[in-house]
Amino acid sequence: MNKTQWHGIIPPLVTPLKDNDTLDIEALERLVNHVITGGVHGIFLLGTTGEGPSLSRELKYRLVEEACRIVNHRVPLLAGITDTSFTESIALANHAALHGADAVVAAPPYYMPPSQPELLDYIKHLAPKLPLPLFLYNMPAMTKVNIDVDTVKRAADIPNVIGIKDSSCSMIYVHELIDAMKNRDFPVLIGPEEMLGESVLLGAQGGVNGGANILPALYVSMYHAAESGDAPRMRKLQADIMRLREIYRVGHYASSGIKGIKCALSIMGICGDYMAEPFQHFYEPERERVAQILAALR
Amino acid sequence: MNKTQWHGIIPPLVTPLKDNDTLDIEALERLVNHVITGGVHGIFLLGTTGEGPSLSRELKYRLVEEACRIVNHRVPLLAGITDTSFTESIALANHAALHGADAVVAAPPYYMPPSQPELLDYIKHLAPKLPLPLFLYNMPAMTKVNIDVDTVKRAADIPNVIGIKDSSCSMIYVHELIDAMKNRDFPVLIGPEEMLGESVLLGAQGGVNGGANILPALYVSMYHAAESGDAPRMRKLQADIMRLREIYRVGHYASSGIKGIKCALSIMGICGDYMAEPFQHFYEPERERVAQILAALR
Amino acid sequence: MNKTQWHGIIPPLVTPLKDNDTLDIEALERLVNHVITGGVHGIFLLGTTGEGPSLSRELKYRLVEEACRIVNHRVPLLAGITDTSFTESIALANHAALHGADAVVAAPPYYMPPSQPELLDYIKHLAPKLPLPLFLYNMPAMTKVNIDVDTVKRAADIPNVIGIKDSSCSMIYVHELIDAMKNRDFPVLIGPEEMLGESVLLGAQGGVNGGANILPALYVSMYHAAESGDAPRMRKLQADIMRLREIYRVGHYASSGIKGIKCALSIMGICGDYMAEPFQHFYEPERERVAQILAALR
Amino acid sequence: MNKTQWHGIIPPLVTPLKDNDTLDIEALERLVNHVITGGVHGIFLLGTTGEGPSLSRELKYRLVEEACRIVNHRVPLLAGITDTSFTESIALANHAALHGADAVVAAPPYYMPPSQPELLDYIKHLAPKLPLPLFLYNMPAMTKVNIDVDTVKRAADIPNVIGIKDSSCSMIYVHELIDAMKNRDFPVLIGPEEMLGESVLLGAQGGVNGGANILPALYVSMYHAAESGDAPRMRKLQADIMRLREIYRVGHYASSGIKGIKCALSIMGICGDYMAEPFQHFYEPERERVAQILAALR
């Protein structure tokens, strides 16, 4: 693929689990088909919503294999290779390439936070060793490090670095990215779904939004409304997105977002709600509340 | 061992590397012997100073094997098993037990930060699956999560949880821990070496101090001075520790501490200064500055 | 005025100074006329850009008097009464009412940060004592406290509380506010100018943007483009706003924004660039750089 | 006074209030006499515990007058002049000098946070305009700005700057300060009472501890135990201090500390518990809990 093919809605796929160490392959198949039927433009494995860093090496490898098989090139597939170990990131990228993924995605190493020059060096060392093109993944809430716009600009000069997924939740940063990259072929994909519409309207190429696991067509519709500058439709879809995200706030902790998505998928019969450690799924009354929000939306 | 045997200076051992993926076994041998000769009371592998999270699974396993062989029960050995994957933590603990380590050490999962109740659940799930006793490792600068004193108190009731290493850099937290644990057999070991003296004086059992890789006897002396309440000697040794820590501030970034320790060990001929990604060793003029600080100290 | 009259571009007016304690009244007159000629819909005195908290009580009172006289009801006037002292806030509000201001604006007390319930109580105690309607001012970067959306909702039930200026720089928060207030007459005004367009497009009533001191017509144009949902024009104006904001990044510190605005106004001959303590104006080469950015824009 | 006279326990005096704007002068007299009888070495007015920034200008001036009159040079008196307005700080210092205070104390301006060079400039501009010697006040939790050790070293060269009160709660910073100032006559006074003992033991000159409003003799005893290096006595007194500070944690918010102190003084019959806005005093069951802690201590 070339860079311009990366656009639209690319859900950060939930990882269906039978227990802490067993992939639920049938549920994975249902989930993949659910989002592709919903019109998504790609699939991203092993992101934050996919609980990537919580999974064992074997489970990650298995997920990549099975997802590649199931997706079967119906949409482009991105595999998250974020790891605190450089060697493990490369090994996982090789595995993803072998099984047919289209690109990889890496956030900064997230234990010891690198400075910007160290981060740029890291990207410079990593990208040439990867068998697939690399999306940067800006996720400071988890990695403690923001990928500064200046670092992105320099990284974009590295041949194998093709775009960025931004989950900084900073619209100012998104504007800076769009402004810095406006004359380059370097897609900017937006994580926080509340900001999907305006980001696409003003120059981003798409969204990597957790809610697209649940209602993929809602996010695909917002993408198209924003792309065509249809403000009244955007306002209506924004209200729906604001309703859906109430699911993420049902629980009491920061983990509420990913718990809420798995809970909703479980209520919909798509996959179970087993969470990888250190999290546990929602119990009542949270589950009932998710069901109510979902019912009101559909 | 029983809990009361955990005391004194337990260096968080640097991991000598030949390149990003190759352990330098001869250097490891020199380093282990250097710290044991210096009088340390234990050794901690795969901590932050040991660049644990930056190493591949194979390298971690190899390090544990070789260190167990070299130490050969001359002092107790703790192996860090901190990982964002529950499964990987347990597997590494099993490997450590098989090769003769005495305990394991785990910080909270460091990508997705758990709340305190989630963290307590995680510890409750983890400890019974471990073949060795568990030290908690409080390292909020890296994990984004503080292990609240109340969580420590509850975790201390779990049979296999035997103590805590605190690197919060908060003396108030240390006082709270000491106060909460004063009638229990639950050793508190201090990470930040600036706070070693007063912590031991006022009730901590020892220190896990990076500088003890370089000058183990300095930290052992401070431990003994504090244990015996020798204030004038503490003030003198404190001044030396403040000098040594200038090594950690030679570089411009947060990584300066672990770079400085490897640089000093390299100047001393104990091990090379190869750093695991995402870091690179000091070049001139930083190396020259480290040499000067070291020369003034010895 | 009623609430619905609060909309459009309301510049947070710079305070022209002759020295640390002397208002430059002629410059104030030029500046007020400059922004009114540029089409602004209101003027906000004594905000962050106006260096409000840095000014003495006498200077604040004088500024309110003179600005009221100069504006002379050509546009609505808001006076900032943010203070760590409740008594001083009320006294300043009374002074503003006496001289003809139309509303007051208060951020949370900014030394000792209140919790949300304490903050709501504070607003409940403050509003009835004020002779003018009150806009809340959310400015967590300065006050250390975010006014949570739930607190805003409750505060909006207090009769005298009529709207909010948000400078959180969080577009997610803006969406939450708009969503929470969509069926109420409670204007949401946006501080960060990078986010003005999308905020108005999606439901905010206007902007309180520092750059409108310099080029008021640019922000007024963006307001109208967003209000009418003209996406192509928004993209063009957004690019201009991104150029202007380079002025705020000329200096090395967080103070660069307000220094840059005064520097630009000084280059334009509107007012001097004297800064209240603890800041000093730009020297070369920063001033030259501001001049270049300004020349490229006009 | 010369610098070396600044040592020992200097309570940050609570401001007794009858209502939000009325000083309780009789209570002030009881409180001053209570702490002087308890053996304190000085008194600090208008600090954080004194709710300084929450008081109106008139109330601050009145407090300074009355406290100077009541103390009547029995112990040295420091007046807090921290303000976001440079002019107001100087005016208050002049008032304090006129009425007989011995020194003033200033934290950085706390609305717009200065960078370190800007902060040093601010101190350079402020100190020569003050009629009394100046203590720096490091209180980053409130001011958002740490006074870096390097800035303190440079500020210490300014003739009128004579010492520092540190409330950073960082023992590492305290060690750095002590180390940097060990050959100079520049007293370091410690805010957080948990760290009083070790700080004095290792080189600080004293403490400015809120709890000394309640039980001044406890802190005076710790000061003397630490000064004489009596470790067993320090451990015992530390346990008492840890008990007393439970008072600060009775409430649910950050304000619990200052509320707890006023509540305790009210139970002891020394002053009322009226809090300045934005805070309200403890109600039941918090008040009952404070009474229990107090009873157990006395």
Image (spheres, coloured by chain):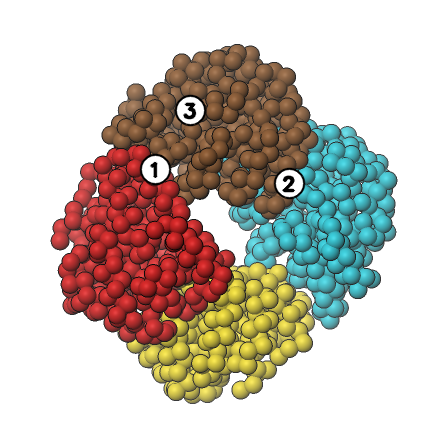
Chain colours: A yellow, B red, C cyan, D brown
Disc number for residue B167: none
Query: In the drawing, does residue B55 fall left or right of residue C263?
Result: left
Query: In the drawing, does residue D287 fall left or right of residue C127?
Result: left
Q: Determine whether label 2 and label 1 are within 8 Å by CB.
A: no
Residue A104's x, y, as percent? 46, 78
Q: Residue at x 30, y 24 (%)?
A: D297
Query: In the drawing, does residue A280 fall left or right of residue B259?
Result: left
Tag 2: amino acid: Asp
Chain letter of disc 3 in the image: D
Whole-angstrom CA distance, mark 2 to mark 1, is 34 Å
Query: In the drawing, does residue A137 fall left or right of residue B225?
Result: right
Can you tell which quarter of the image residue A25 is in? bottom left
Can you tell which quarter of the image residue B179 is in? top left
Q: Relative to A33, say whether C225 is above or below.
A: above
Residue C75's x, y, as percent? 81, 45
B133 or B269, which lies in front?
B269
Report whether residue B193 is seen: yes
Tag 1: amino acid: Arg
Q: Which residue is mark 1?
A: B235
Whole-angstrom CA distance, mark 2 to mark 3, is 30 Å
Q: Which residue is mark 2?
A: D121
Q: Relative to D165, say whether B156 is above or below.
A: below
Query: How many numbered marks appear?
Result: 3
The local secondary structure at tag 2 comes to helix
Residue at mark 2 shares a chain with residue at mark 1: no
Chain letter of disc 2 in the image: D
